[in-house]
Image (cartoon, helix red, strand yellow):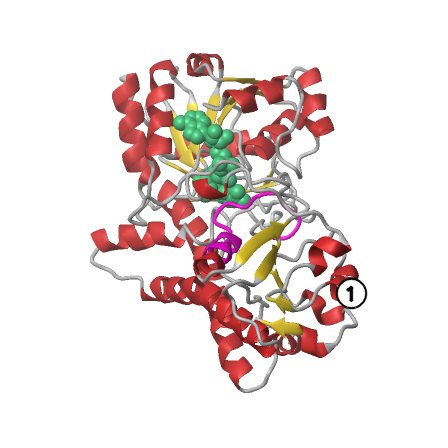
Amino acid sequence: MQLSTLDSRTTEDRPEPSLVSPLPILTDIAVVGLGYVGLPLSLQFARSGVNVLGLDVDADKVNALNEGRSYIKHVATETVADQVKANRLEATTDFARVDEVDAVIICVPTPLNKNREPDISFILQTGRAIAPHLRKGTLVVLESTTYPGTTDEDLRATLEAGSGLKAGEDFHLAFSPEREDPANPDSKVGEVPKLVGGLTPACLEKAVRLYSRAIKTVVPVSSCRVAEAAKLLENIFRSVNIALVNELKLVYASMGIDIWEVIAAAKTKPFGFMPFYPGPGLGGHCIPIDPFYLTWKAREFEHSTRFIELAGEINTSMPDYVVHRVAEALNNSGKAIKGSRILILGLAYKPNVDDERESPSYRLLEKLKQRGAIVAYHDPHVPVIRPTREHPHWTGTKSVPWTRPTISGFDLVLIATAHASVNYRELADWAQCIVDTRNVMAGVQIASAKVWKA
Ligand SMILES: NC(=O)c1ccc[n+]([C@@H]2O[C@H](COP(=O)([O-])OP(=O)(O)OC[C@H]3O[C@@H](n4cnc5c(N)ncnc54)[C@H](O)[C@@H]3O)[C@@H](O)[C@H]2O)c1
């Protein structure tokens, strides 16, 4: 086990941590919520020799896993099949089976509600479902991103009420934030250091032992709240820095300066600078949402989170800027948005994934349609739009085929996501006009009048 602590001492200098007292090895765990976070985590534990019981309310996912099939594009079916065949991974919708395991890890969604306030109802539902089946000594770890206090107040109260057991005495409770970066080959679940905070020292000890079975570096912190707050800091840091380059993009564009060239130049500085890149708006299940978990909680302590609000405001306004650039590009050819055929290239919120939750592409589709454009999308990873709560009216819409007649039939192609599998050389040859929000056309030889950066 490699224990990383937050002090600056090397492993050799440090006294052997008290965490490594002889405790039984945890061999059976349940992972609740088998989505983008829960499935890769389950597989990592299974590969490490832990028996994993996957729990989900979605019977389709449960059936797929038991048949050895993956339903996430960047998780290979063979990886799932190997663990199912080895009897290391089984899935169920039966929460009563929590009484078979030593630890339960919760990876359920934490969205915002209609008023953009935290919705921890999935966590509390899970708490209510597992509480009656907790045994003395079971460890419960929350991984879902949330505001400080969720684990030791909300989840704790739900588990205690439903089980009649006391957290920290009868069962263990901890928080360990997920740091999943889907489709990033350099981000392997077992290699990314894992923060862990426990309700008591004994809770921490047990949680560190659990994760050390599957994760190379486990970083203990002093409480669940520190671990919850650290995850929010990581995501707020991204949101604020993306907003900064989005704002600079507009300022520099007015000065005739290309933000992409500026960032490439600045990042040659070997210290004190980290590049962030502009785009058509924030997407995904984390960066547009998580910062507002803190905003909401901060109000209870009479604080306003001005940086977070400002970053949200700037990032949210980006699709309007992109639409403005689309209007300029069309206008240049004597066309209006109204009646023009516009193709959004890339529906997923980031390159090379099939996840289009919270994608700014939806906002671009809506805004252009409202202005009278005839809109369509192409995304090699999203052949058809699945039903979603947020965009029900796009359900069933299909990605248009990637052929010269189809692509050249659009008045304008708007690049929203830079998927690596798209042939941008062909796009340069086929498209009438391109608006590029990702700078992907920079390396492609093309008439400059045809490409508009946005
Ligand atoms: N996706 C990411 O890249 C990422 C990265 C870091 C953190 N997170 C955080 O991890 C958490 C999970 O995110 P995700 O992307 O895996 O979500 P997801 O929607 O992909 O998966 C959630 C799963 O939970 C299941 N579920 C919902 N309610 C349930 C319930 N009551 N009981 C059991 N299962 C239930 C759903 O059916 C789904 O399979 C969120 O808090 C998110 O903010 C996500």
Image point (49%, 64%), residue name: 338
**Position in image of residue 31 (x %, y %):** 51, 26
Residue 244: image location, x then y, percent:
47, 71
- Left or right: residue 103 versus residue 427 is left
What segment carries the magenta color?
Answer: 350-366
Q: Mark 1, residues whose alpha carbon is within 10 Å: few (<14), some, or many (≥20)?
A: some
Left or right placement of residue 136 versus residue 43 in this view: left
In the image as oriented, which residue stretches furthest toward the bottom? 255
Where is residue 307? Give x, y as percent: 36, 66
Q: Is residue 196 above or below residue 298?
A: above
> Label 1, on which residue?
429
Dividing the picture into quadrants, the one containing residue 168 is top left
Of the 4 image quadrants, the one containing the N terminus is top right
Q: Is residue 60 visible?
A: yes
305 up-or-down from 120: above or below:
below
142 over 130 or under it: above or below: below
Q: Is residue 267 visible?
A: no
Q: Residue at x 76, y 73 (%)?
A: 446
At 37% from the left and 32% from the top, the residue drawn is 122
* Type of the residue with mark 1: Asp
